[in-house]
Amino acid sequence: MTKAAAIRGESIVYVVRSDDLLGRDKIGAAIVATALLSGARTASLELKEGAANTLAIERDSTLDAISTWVRYLLGGGPRGELVRLGGSHLGKALP
Amino acid sequence: MSSAVVTGAAGGIGTAICRRLAGEGWRLILVDLATALAGVATELETLTMVRPVQADLTTEEGIQAVRSEVLELGGSLELVVNNAGITRDARLANLSEENFTLVLDVNLGAPFRLVETLHPLMDAGAIVNISSRAYLGNFGQYNYSMSKGGLVGLTRAYALQLAPRIRVNAIAPGLIGTEITKAIPADVREKMVAAIPMQRMGTPEEVAALVSYLATASYITGEVITIGGGRSLSR
């Protein structure tokens, strides 16, 4: 899907869990979350049109908040960026 | 005497890691798919007890071959260095599914399988995963960047799950002078070096020294340490 979007020049948003970026849950989930974050950074270097970004959500993130931020990130501006909803990452490792 | 498993032992960084650990008295299980492994083993036999395992770590047979060697060597396994990795570079728009899957399987799937298999054999010690500065993003390396980013997640998750018994850390090297980087056209390499604040490539020995440090750094776990001469800051 990412490749197809890149070919079409469309923007990409990966939605992951904040806990997984810090490896707080299952190994596989952590691997996927951090791999996608790296993928977004590299894709943004390559995309001439559009951008790839990552949105990290928490258990209590609302669908409204998630969809709002996905729309923002699809709208242009940030490239290869990580936006984290909530504050469970504060005081913890940078991704 | 403690033993260590090092994957990718026949490559530039891997061989440097093995030489460093051998000099420090570690017993080594050297793992690589390449036949050049035999030469590395012969060299290091003068320094320490060495067991070469020519194996494909993307297969269950390969993983079990390493496990068998660990058990046969005896003593306590206290260090696993996941260093093996490959590249199959292409822009995302041209990246084949085959090369996407292959790079993720070798660079990420194999370390996962190896750690799952070997950590039950460890009473204590450390796991060091060789990631890459490319996990921060690198043009033409979507597959490689994802694999090395995934290693960061693997590192963090295992660090939490295996503490306090085993420490798990990652190293993210930048441009390191190996046979692979020597193959880069000179003009391209010069431009790459010019973008490094330290104005040179790193050496495999510098990466090996960091592995050695993390092997015994008793209060560091879950960290990613970049060794890139400042390249992760410069334009």
Image (tube, rainbow, N blue to C red):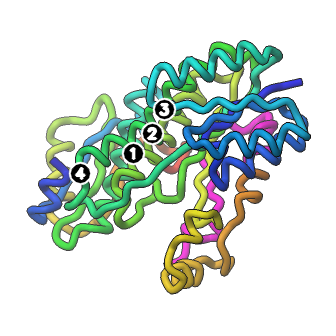
Residue B122 falls in image quadrant: top right
Disc 4 from disc 1: Cα separation: 11 Å
Give whichever of discs 4 and 1 has the lower sequence position.
4
Q: Which residue is mark 4?
A: B96
Q: Is residue B146 magenta?
A: no
Question: Extreme left residue here?
Answer: A8
Disc 4 from disc 3: Cα separation: 20 Å
Disc 2 from disc 4: Cα separation: 16 Å
Residue B95 falls in image quadrant: bottom left
Q: Which residue is mark 2?
A: B106
Q: Amino acid at mark 2?
A: Val
In the image, residue B203 above or below residue B131: below
Q: Which residue is mark 1?
A: B103
Residue B77, horizontal then vertical, whole percent: 75, 22
- Which SS class for mark 2? helix
Residue B44, horizontal then vertical, whole percent: 83, 42
Disc 3 from disc 2: Cα separation: 5 Å
Dots 1, 2 in contact, CB < 8 A = yes
Circle 2 crowding by C-alpha within 10 Å: few under 14, some 14–19, many from 20: many
